[in-house]
Image: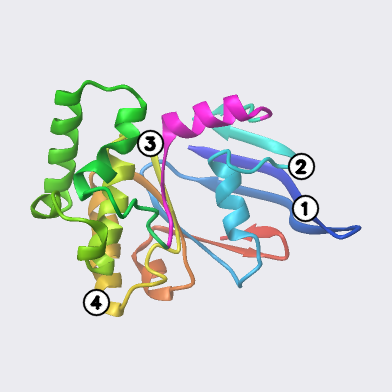
Amino acid sequence: MITIKHLFKSFKQGKVDFKVLDDLDMTIKEGKMTAIMGRSGAGKTTLLNILCGLCRMDSGEYYFQGKPIDLSTSSKADKFRNQNFGIITQQPSLLNDYTVYENIALPLEYQKIAKKDIEKIVTETAQELSIDEKLEQYPDELSGGQLQRVSIARALCQNPSIILADEPTGSLDSAAEIEIVELFKKLNGLGKTIVIITHSSFIASYCDEVITIKDGKAFT
């Protein structure tokens, strides 16, 4: 589904270029659940941001569904990301003065989807994730696991080809971690391609593939 070849990425620290990803090659297989692991600072989040067009590579080749992808401008990157990716972060970026329903519906409203269609999509997605009884509540009334379910629902309602999750259980207790990783496994079983950045060997054990980032390169 995704193939990366000869990816280089560096950042400036003062007058010095700090190389993060160094001639990295990797493949994300369609329909698989893949963990990306590595020590802190190895470049995992940078790689994730490059995959969805939030960060530009210095050089390299990017293929999606076998076709080369041009992410050289913000408009091209935004279009590619919005059409293909659902993104989930460690701390759900929900609006506290919006209800759960309103938080999930927000990206659909930006797309100017009809109100009745938004209601159907949000309701069905919430039911699938077992948060339909929470739709009229506010984020500060929910547990950590429930908040992450809302974040996942917001990503899913856009029907992405790939779900990218950056340390999605990093701030959760062990019970909530099990709850969320089993939810990802369920979604994967329904055909979603899922990529998870994690330090957790427990989460990695649920995945079909594990890619380790070390010294700027990817190892399987």
Q: Secondary structure at mark 2?
A: loop
The residue that label 4 is drawn on is: 175
Can you name the residue that lies furthest to the front here? 97
Residue 10, disc = 1
Q: Quadrant of residue 107?
A: top left
Whole-Å distance between the Cαs marked 1 and 2?
7 Å
Q: How many residues crowd mark 1 within 10 Å: few (<14), some (14–19), many (20+)?
A: some
Whole-Å distance between the Cαs marked 2 and 3?
25 Å
Q: At which x and y percent is residue 178?
A: 26, 71
For badge 1, the amino acid type reads: Ser
Whole-Å distance between the Cαs marked 4 and 2?
40 Å
Residue 53 visible, this orientation:
yes
Name the N-terminal-most of marks 4 and 3.
3
Residue 40, disc = none
The colour scheme used here is: rainbow
The residue that label 2 is drawn on is: 58
Whole-Å distance between the Cαs marked 4 and 1?
38 Å
Name the N-terminal-most of marks 4 and 2.
2
For badge 2, the amino acid type reads: Asp
Name the N-terminal-most of marks 4 and 1.
1
Q: State the extent of the magenta-drawn residues as a range.
A: 72-90
Name the N-terminal-most of marks 1 and 3.
1
Q: Considering depth in this image, is 213 or 56 the residue closer to the camera? A: 56
Can you name the residue that lies furthest to the right here? 15
Residue at point 56%, 60% (across, down): 220
Q: Is residue 18 magenta?
A: no
Q: Considering depth in this image, is 55 or 181 the residue closer to the camera? A: 55
Residue at point 74%, 49% (across, down): 9
